[in-house]
Image: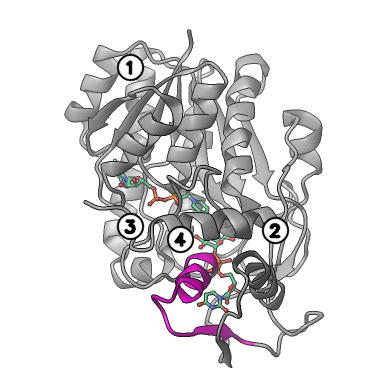
Amino acid sequence: MSTVLVTGGNGYIGSHTVIALHESGYEVVIADNLSNSKLEVQRRLEKITGKSFKFYNVDCCDKEALRQVFEENKIDSVIHFAGLKAVGESVRIPLDYYRNNIMSAITVAELMKEYGVGKLVFSSSATVYGMSEDVPFTEESPLGVCTNPYGWTKWMIEQILRDFASANPEIKVCLLRYFNPVGAHESGLIGEDPRGIPNNLFPYISKVAGGTLECLTVFGDDYNTPDGTCLRDYIHVCDLADGHVKAIEYLAKTEENVCVFNLGTGKGTSVKEAIAAFEKACGHEIKHVFGARRPGDIPVCYASTEKAERELGFKARFGIDEMCSSCWKWQTMNPDGLAD
Ligand code: NAD
Ligand code: UFG
């Protein structure tokens, strides 16, 4: 049985991917330092799958500690999710972001080389396309100028991993550029569990819907879009998880050293449309006001999904209604998130 090391596998996207890998017959080993997730996720994963996954509480920047994971397991491929991801925080503490995100990626790559592990999937982001308004973004769209240190870490790690793969023909790398992952597992047992007041739209709407937060501020309704609010390509986290299984399968058969895929739905949804869809899912109004634009936001961002469909065989199954209903189920079952 093929074994996948999932770094950051205790986090939001990682935990959903662990389930998808398990359901596709992979053995999974998880490495996570719990800096942005709770150990309770492991108990939830066991409840969902009936399996207790091998879990290492380890910092992926700590080479000797991570070496133990490679020493004790016969790893065939790695999905590297581990990283810090809060855009605003990255502006305040840029060096922490550069150190954590870049050092963890380099450390993982070094150990892969040392232990002869040849397949790496990396969590990149549509943020690498920068401020361009030339949508949809295809994998060939030029990389842009990022607006924050978090975005630059993705941009830089993509380049580092390309160089790593070119210098090491036995290594194959798949860069996955996610658009806007939202939603939760159908069980309602795992989902996005941000610390403090959420920065992103869906966790914020969920908390307003659940009554923990008073009112959503919509950042700008004067954009040049059909209803004046920004369009984003929201993708159900379970679809995104399946995309990782496809990427692992793809790496097993491709001759290419480096491949890049967008993971999105190809459809833009406005903030107003997202609110309306959530209201339908929860059955009541979501209080919101219109405020100023948020610096760094682009009006429209959505993926071209052609390449992922054609080469990976990946197509998102869920639409905005399923994203909202699963989010709402997670919110109602876990109004205060997971316990420490
Ligand atoms: P998350 O914070 O829920 O998960 C990341 C996990 O990595 C957490 O459990 C955290 O404890 C762990 N971690 C962080 N640094 C670590 C380190 N040095 N060593 C070990 N573990 C570490 O985030 P997520 O939303 O699941 O995102 C997963 C990946 O996908 C991240 O790399 C993120 O940048 C990327 N991504 C996320 C989004 C999004 O909107 N959620 C969009 C594009 C890309
Ligand atoms: N928004 C609001 N009010 C809020 C929060 C968000 O109106 O309280 C709006 C934003 O202005 C934007 C849309 O909702 O128009 C989506 O915002 P998010 O913060 O949920 O998502 P972003 O598209 O800004 O960013 C996400 C990830 C980043 C990633 C980027 C790549 O959070 O990590 O997608 O496309 F880099």
CB atoms of marks 1 and 4 within 8 Å = no
Does 74 sit above or below residue 130? above
Q: Nearer the viewer, residue 37 or 116?
A: 37
Distance (Cα) linking label 4 and label 3: 32 Å
Q: Is residue 204 magenta?
A: yes
The residue singled out by tag 1 in the image is 114
The residue singled out by tag 4 in the image is 332
Give the mark nearest the N terminus, 2 or 3. 3
Give the mark nearest the N terminus, 1 or 2. 1
| Residue bounds of the magenta highlight | 202-220
Q: SS class of the residue under badge 1?
A: helix
Q: Amino acid at mark 2?
A: Asp
Residue 247 relative to residue 90: left or right: right
Distance (Cα) linking label 1 and label 2: 45 Å
The residue singled out by tag 3 in the image is 97
> What residue is drawn where x is 18% and y is 29%?
65
Q: SS class of the residue under badge 4?
A: helix
Give the mark nearest the N terminus, 4 or 3. 3
The residue singled out by tag 2 in the image is 321
Distance (Cα) linking label 3 and label 1: 25 Å
Give the mark nearest the N terminus, 3 or 1. 3
Location of residue 177 in the rendering, given as x and y in whole percent from the top left corner:
60, 47
- Closer to the eye: label 2 or 3: 2
Q: Amino acid at mark 4?
A: Thr
Q: Is mark 3 within 8 Å of ligand 1?
A: no
